[in-house]
Amino acid sequence: MKQLAIKLIVIVLLILPVEGMTLTLKLAYSDVESYPFQMGDGADVANPPGLALDIIDNVALKLDIEVEYSRLPGKRVLEAIALGKVDGGFIFSFNDQRAKHARYPMTGDMPDSAKRIATIGYYFFSLEEQSIEWDGENLATPDYKIGAHLGYSIVKDLQKSS
């Protein structure tokens, strides 16, 4: 009888909301602006912070949780996720390497595009007298020099297509 009473007390304590306890979610994101999704550069959260943070904050409010943000260089965000130093990160495109350490909303074996916060595109810019021919997968002249942010996933994609 005593064990049954203890079990019931434990169950009731697990069911009842605990006043004063708040769940804090630790999220990291890049310290480089990606307008309009994450604003400002550097370690401090900008004001306004950007659409991605607005969305996350809105959901956190509805779920009654707090969010602690950290801004780090992109590779350090991914490392912090892999090492479990943070609960998650954003805005990162899906690739198999990242999926080893992070969970993405999936439909089958593909990322669920309906659940992404943002769609970020890449663009080629050139001098007016130096046109670029791109068929969506390959450059017509493979010896063009292309610049991109070090560590961004697009770099590997560009290297594959050259």
Image (spheres, rainbow, N blue to C red):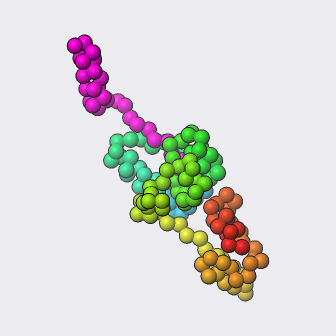
User: Which residue sits furthest right?
Assistant: 143
Of the pair 136 and 70, the residue shown nearer to us:
136
Of the pair 158 and 96, the residue shown nearer to us:
96
Q: Quadrant of residue 15?
A: top left
On the image, the x and y values in percent for residue 58 come to 37, 51
On the image, the x and y values in percent for residue 99 come to 55, 53
Q: Can residue 6 be seen in this view?
A: yes
Of the pair 64 and 45, the residue shown nearer to us:
64
Region in magenta: 1-30
Q: In this view, does 135 lie above or below 72?
A: below
Q: Quadrant of residue 17?
A: top left
Q: Can residue 117 be seen in this view?
A: no
Q: Residue at x 37, y 50 (%)?
A: 59
Q: Is residue 63 above or below residue 159?
A: above
Q: In this view, does 49 lie above or below 85?
A: below
Image quarter in which the N terminus is found: top left
Q: Give the side of residue 77 with respect to residue 52, left or right.
A: right
Query: Is residue 89 in the magenta section?
Result: no
Q: Residue at x 62, y 61 (%)?
A: 153
Q: Give the side of residue 87 with respect to residue 133, left or right.
A: left
Query: Is residue 19 in the magenta section?
Result: yes
On the image, the x and y values in percent for residue 53 come to 46, 53
Q: Residue at x 37, y 31 (%)?
A: 21
Image quarter in which the C terminus is found: bottom right
Q: Which residue is drawn at 25% across and 12% down?
A: 2
Q: Give the side of residue 62 with respect to residue 66, left or right.
A: left
User: How many discs mark residues in the rendered view?
Assistant: 0
User: Which residue sits furthest left?
Assistant: 1
On the image, the x and y values in percent for residue 52 come to 46, 57
User: Which residue sits furthest bottom?
Assistant: 129
